[in-house]
């Protein structure tokens, strides 16, 4: 078996690259610059799609966190004496509010990251289009998209990590508020 895998690896590594027009690029009828441009723009478009998804999920997390707090308050006000008699419920309610505030802060911090590189700049594009061939333009645009993609990645990572922390705060808020509602009903407390 290992012999066959070694032979397959040898065939793949030592395969000759065609130097004539029989390459896969020539089969599609597109130049390397056209394919490079297409891939670069699709990657940048996909990145912007991911940014929109992250923002939508962040909004959903904040909406859920903002909804469970008043629902909990409504449930607890139905029997004020039970809340007054249960220290665990009071502490849990306070911690739930603290976690909600942390969720709100992290949510707002994630939205502060909103400056995205979407090259090419229209003014720069106007200057570059003069006197260039289509292949040169595709290469230049592909390079601009790749640079934009690379400059956006660290900001997306920061934004996603803030949303990840907000998710943990939402889970902690929900747990604390659940305890605050259930603790007065528990005879042990």
Image: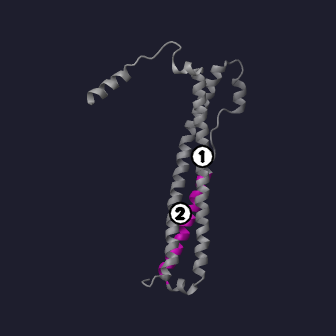
Colour mapping: one colour
Q: Is residue 84 above or below residue 69?
A: below
95 falls in the magenta region:
yes
* Residue 73 lies in quadrant: bottom right
Q: Which residue is denoted by mark 1 in the rendering?
A: 51
Q: Is residue 126 left or right of residue 157?
A: right
Q: Position of residue 44 (x, y in %)?
A: 60, 37
Asked which secondary structure carries label 1, the reply is helix
Chief secondary structure of the magenta portion: helix
Quarter holding the C terminus? bottom left
Q: Is residue 162 left or right of residue 1?
A: right
For the magenta stretch, what is the residue range?
86-111
Q: Is residue 71 above or below residue 43?
A: below
Q: Residue at x 64, y 34 (%)?
A: 119
Q: Which residue is denoted by mark 2 in the rendering?
A: 170
Q: Which badge, 1 or 2, is on the more N-terminal residue? A: 1
Residue 73 is labelled as none
Give the crowd class for mark 2: few <14, some 14-19, many >=20 residues within 10 Å. many
155 falls in the magenta region:
no
* Residue 145 lies in quadrant: top right
Q: Residue at x 69, y 29 (%)?
A: 124
Q: Position of residue 37 (x, y in %)?
A: 60, 28
Q: In front: 118, or 127?
A: 118
Q: Residue at x 56, y 18 (%)?
A: 26
């Amino acid at each position: 078996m290992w012999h066959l895998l070694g032979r397959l690896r040898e065939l793949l590594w030592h395969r000759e690259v065609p130097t004539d027009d029989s390459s896969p690029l020539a089969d599609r009828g597109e130049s390397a610059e056209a394919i490079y441009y297409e891939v670069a723009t699709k990657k940048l478009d996909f990145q912007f799609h991911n940014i929109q998804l992250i923002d939508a999920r962040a909004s959903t997390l904040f909406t859920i966190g903002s909804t469970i707090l008043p629902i909990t308050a409504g449930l607890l006000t139905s029997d004020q004496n039970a809340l007054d008699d249960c220290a665990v419920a009071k502490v849990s309610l306070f911690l739930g509010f603290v976690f909600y505030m942390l969720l709100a802060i992290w949510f707002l911090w994630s939205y502060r990251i909103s400056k995205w590189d979407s090259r090419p700049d229209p003014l720069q594009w106007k200057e570059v289009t003069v006197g260039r061939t289509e292949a040169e333009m595709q290469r230049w645009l592909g390079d601009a998209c790749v640079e934009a993609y690379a400059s956006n990645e660290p900001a997306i990572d920061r934004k996603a990590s803030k949303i990840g922390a907000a998710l943990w705060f939402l889970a902690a808020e929900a747990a604390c508020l659940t305890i605050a509602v259930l603790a007065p009903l528990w005879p042990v407390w």
